[in-house]
Image (cartoon, coloured by chain):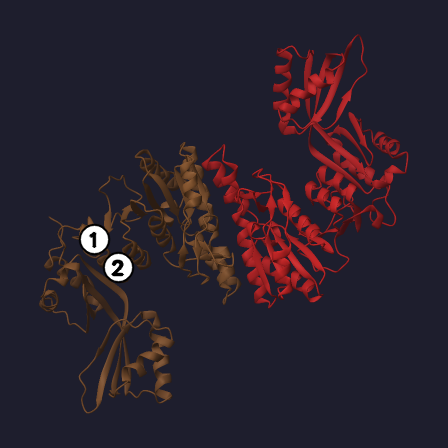
Chain colours: A brown, B red
Amino acid sequence: MPVLVMKFGGTSVATLDRIRRAAKRVGVEVAKGYDVIVIVSAMSGETNKLVGYVEETSPLFDAREYDAVVSSGENVTAGLMALTLQEMDVPARSWQGWQVPLETTSAHSSARIVNIPTDNINRKFGEGMRVAVVAGFQGISPEGRITTLGRGGSDTTAVAFAAAFGAERCDIYTDVDGVYTTDPRICDKARKLDKIAFEEMLELASLGAKVLQTRSVELAMRYKVKLRVLSSFEEQSDEAGTLVCDEEEIMELNVVSGVAHSRDEAKMTLISVADRPGIAAAIFSPLSEAGVNVDMIVQNISEDGRTDMTFSCPTNQVARAEQALKAAQDAGSINFHDLVADTDVCKISVVGIGMRSHTGVAAKMFKVLSNEGINIKVITTSEIKISVLVDRKYMELAVQALHTAFELDKAA
Amino acid sequence: MPVLVMKFGGTSVATLDRIRRAAKRVGVEVAKGYDVIVIVSAMSGETNKLVGYVEETSPLFDAREYDAVVSSGENVTAGLMALTLQEMDVPARSWQGWQVPLETTSAHSSARIVNIPTDNINRKFGEGMRVAVVAGFQGISPEGRITTLGRGGSDTTAVAFAAAFGAERCDIYTDVDGVYTTDPRICDKARKLDKIAFEEMLELASLGAKVLQTRSVELAMRYKVKLRVLSSFEEQSDEAGTLVCDEEEIMELNVVSGVAHSRDEAKMTLISVADRPGIAAAIFSPLSEAGVNVDMIVQNISEDGRTDMTFSCPTNQVARAEQALKAAQDAGSINFHDLVADTDVCKISVVGIGMRSHTGVAAKMFKVLSNEGINIKVITTSEIKISVLVDRKYMELAVQALHTAFELDKAA
């Protein structure tokens, strides 16, 4: 029988009632003839509670014990989901990570999946079991200890199972009904996309559209796993949600598929840096060592052997960046007149795989922003994305104007 | 290094603070030179919460899934205890049942321990680890599924580890500071016992002194594991608590060690039963099949080929007993005039290993009760115990009078 993977996040299994609702969705797919692998997260709030216990107990915790504690929330949901399915007369059983066994590296609390043997679960499917409920987010290390996969681990578990079992599709049930052209809370003309290409989803995920974790999208792209994002709180048809798939499967590629924004950006400028070969390395190596995630970088035109260097990083890393750069200044490896941090900015991006073959997207974007009187502070581009930093007060205006200009608005 | 097993129950690990306090006690024993195996229960309330989830999800639950869900509470505590010990610079790690592996039968939710291999944990002790924190109450079946040991499972886990590792002693930390001559809430002259023999403890445990689970005492007796019961809420010396041990280790055996009581008893009388060979079997077989735990049985003297038959059972099984006996009457296998249930009784027992060599204990007991005007309804005796059923209103009086008469009162 064809295999389907269905993943339910924390809000979708937050109560026994919600678990029942999710189980009914699983039952519908079983009735269609699928053998189903269900991946579950912990009931929402549970993992945070456990993480809180660990951090209070031991600020510099042993990641192996962290994993042993934190993984227990998913075990509870897996058992309860199996029981709920059995109550509905659907033959089901639960599997904890080590029982599959989902083999991972030993990098505790951010382990990578190494292998998922399919024989145990497939044998049970052969014996008439219709649903394998697997605790997400967890695996077992070569040393036999419990590992967890880090943020977004359950999405990644789901995609990895879909790849290992050659599943027809991997359905990610969440609290939104799909991927939108932009954030509906900011732009009421936002439209749900029926399909989106992996590459676009990757850019959107990393830009803060928190529907799917970047890592699971990368994995899906590599193994060509069809991903569908849909709501566990609505009645669903086969056409519901958004399908994340290979671009070949999308008939008409959009030039621009979405407009993303991120509030969590700060702009930092080193004023009057001595401009010499190796200066970029001298600036960004200490930042990297300090764990600062530098995103955009702009170097101004040099004048009299000095230049201004601007970069962006997450707002909560500004203090760390300042400290690292001042230490480098004190150590004599760089020399600047001043360091200015601007936390009152935001990042706006347009993403679209069609940009590859269409020119003029950047020019159009800049013109739209200019028409609205919005000054662009920093620009970066990739093959399928253009991002700009602008004053935060313009965020809504910029998103709405770009959404309309790139013809993403839903039909009135 | 000598091995010590220390078990902490749910109230002893109910909060992070209490886990810290328990860990300090462990640290004291490590400092004395012991390698320690710590068995932990779930934080108090957690297991009941999980059981509630399961029962609400599926009234006739699959016990395999029940075990997978319910065992997770102990895993959390085990990890947190290991982290707490590490914070105190005591080398420790946690073990879940399947990691030891604690091998059990497949009787889910009431599994029996089959084997505890010691090599994994001993190898770690050899590498410098000082404390193995083991999640209590759980194991793994031959099929690789998680099992739980049922009520009192963590006490049983602790004793089994002590037997497997040849531990010097098994310390059971709980919310009382030892075993008493009687319930201090009923008799303010109750005295803590320094030592008690396994057989006495067994009788007291099964009579409702809920300090230790019967099963763990049986196991300790079989493997000669010295058990100590003590409070996790008080500063402890080496002499604290009560030592449960082989009678050979107790210099002066008490004729009577304790007076126990149980409110949860009902007396049932079948009036005017036809007295013929096989009548006892005809009455008690259907009760046994109905799951009624018959405790005491008395058959009156027969008259004109008919007799009265009286027995006791737990109060909450009265309805079930009545149903079973009426069904047997209807089926013609027994014949009685009436069935009378008296739920207003209680059981009072005196227990003491010295009874074996002392006569007159029963006579003295009956005389004491008679002097207080207490009528005895049913009597049973074993080698080291005499139990009587009396009206419930006399419970406190009977306990106090017997406690004094058998010289158990503490020095004023």
Q: Is residue B49 visible?
A: no
User: Residue A109's x, y, as percent?
Assistant: 44, 61
Tell me the residue that label 2 is attached to: A202
Q: In this view of the protein, which residue sits in the foreground, A402 or A356?
A: A356
Residue B336 image point, x, y percent: 69, 12
Q: Residue B325 carries which label?
A: none
Residue B4 locus on image (x, y percent): 70, 57
> With B280 as the anchor, is A40 left or right in this view?
left
Please say if B272 is above or below A299: above
Could you say which is closer to the camera, residue A375 or residue A133? Answer: A133
Residue type at mark 2 is Leu
| Disc on res. A196 | 1
Chain of the residue under label 2: A
Packing grade of label 1 (10 A; few <14, some 14-19, many >=20) is: many
* Secondary structure of residue under mark 2: helix
Whether residue A222 can be seen here = yes
* SS for dot 1: strand
Residues at marks 1 and 2 touching, judged by CB atoms closer than 8 Å: no
- Label 1 or label 2, whichever comes before in sequence order: 1
- The residue at 78%/48% (across/down) is B245
